[in-house]
């Protein structure tokens, strides 16, 4: 049995995309996964399964979520080792940039090409730095940063993504990795 972490995209936003933690846990267990645990109500799930293919795990979860909720819930899966590395890189980036006030991580279903990663990093400004490492886009913002970055729009062009505050990333990594 392997352990995996799943991150659900765009749930509990507005009146029509409700998916409480208890329901998420029930559906994941219904797929046959075990040791299911959730963290806060933003779609963060840890579980064990004998399945080894990330794509098959994501597909099984997305199919079950659609059947239960009636709407598509895109899902991004990492191993604890992969996720611990995302948290490690985030902490390292933050430590090297004392002016950073806010930090976010855009989690990606698929790793961008070198050209896509370079294009995303080119969106950096003096008040908002974008760093791509594997299937994660780290966004580091200074207090002077105004408005939204273009990262979300650019990342969306890469396919399925979901965003988390770095504090959530760090907490999950400490708790589950």
Image (cartoon, rainbow, N blue to C red):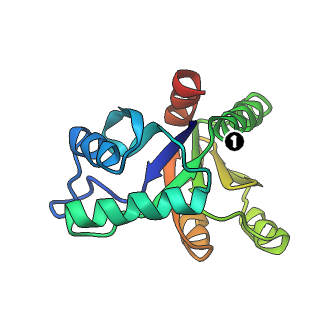
Q: Is residue 139 left or right of residue 147?
A: right
Sort mark 1 into few (<14), some (14-19) or many (20+) by Cα contacts within 10 Å: some
Q: Secondary structure at mark 1?
A: helix
In this view, the residue in front, 53 or 84, is 53
Q: Provide residue 51's location: percent of width, then percent of height.
A: 55, 50
Q: Provide residue 18's location: percent of width, then percent of height.
A: 20, 54
Would residue 59 be seen by someone viewing this image from the given angle? Answer: yes
> Residue at 60% across / 64% down in the picture?
151
> Please, is residue 34 above or below residue 176 in the view?
below
> Residue at 26% across / 69% down in the picture?
71
Would residue 108 be seen by someone viewing this image from the given angle? Answer: no
> Residue at 67% across / 33% down in the picture?
84
Q: What residue is disc 1 on?
A: 82
In this view, the residue in front, 78 or 12, is 78
In this view, the residue in front, 21 or 14, is 21
In this view, the residue in front, 35 or 21, is 35
The quarter of the displayed image where residue 34 is located: top left
Q: Is residue 94 left or right of residue 30?
A: right
> Please, is residue 59 above or below residue 85 in the view?
below
């Amino acid at each position: 049995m392997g352990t995996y972490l799943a991150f659900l995209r765009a749930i509990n936003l507005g009146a029509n995309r409700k998916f409480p933690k208890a329901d998420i846990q029930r559906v994941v267990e219904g797929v046959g996964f075990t040791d299911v645990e959730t963290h806060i109500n933003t779609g963060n799930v840890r579980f064990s399964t004998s399945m080894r293919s990330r794509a098959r795990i994501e597909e099984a979860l997305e199919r079950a979520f659609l059947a239960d909720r009636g709407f598509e819930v895109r899902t991004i899966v990492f191993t604890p080792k992969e996720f611990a590395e995302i948290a490690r890189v985030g902490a390292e980036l933050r430590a090297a940039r004392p002016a950073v006030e806010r930090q976010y991580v855009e989690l990606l279903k698929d790793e961008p090409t070198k050209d896509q990663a370079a294009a995303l990093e080119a969106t950096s400004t003096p008040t908002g730095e974008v760093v791509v490492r594997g299937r994660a886009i780290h966004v580091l913002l200074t207090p002077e940063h105004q408005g939204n970055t273009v990262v979300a729009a650019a990342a969306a062009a890469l396919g399925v993504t979901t965003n988390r505050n770095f504090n959530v990333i760090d907490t999950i990594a400490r708790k589950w990795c």
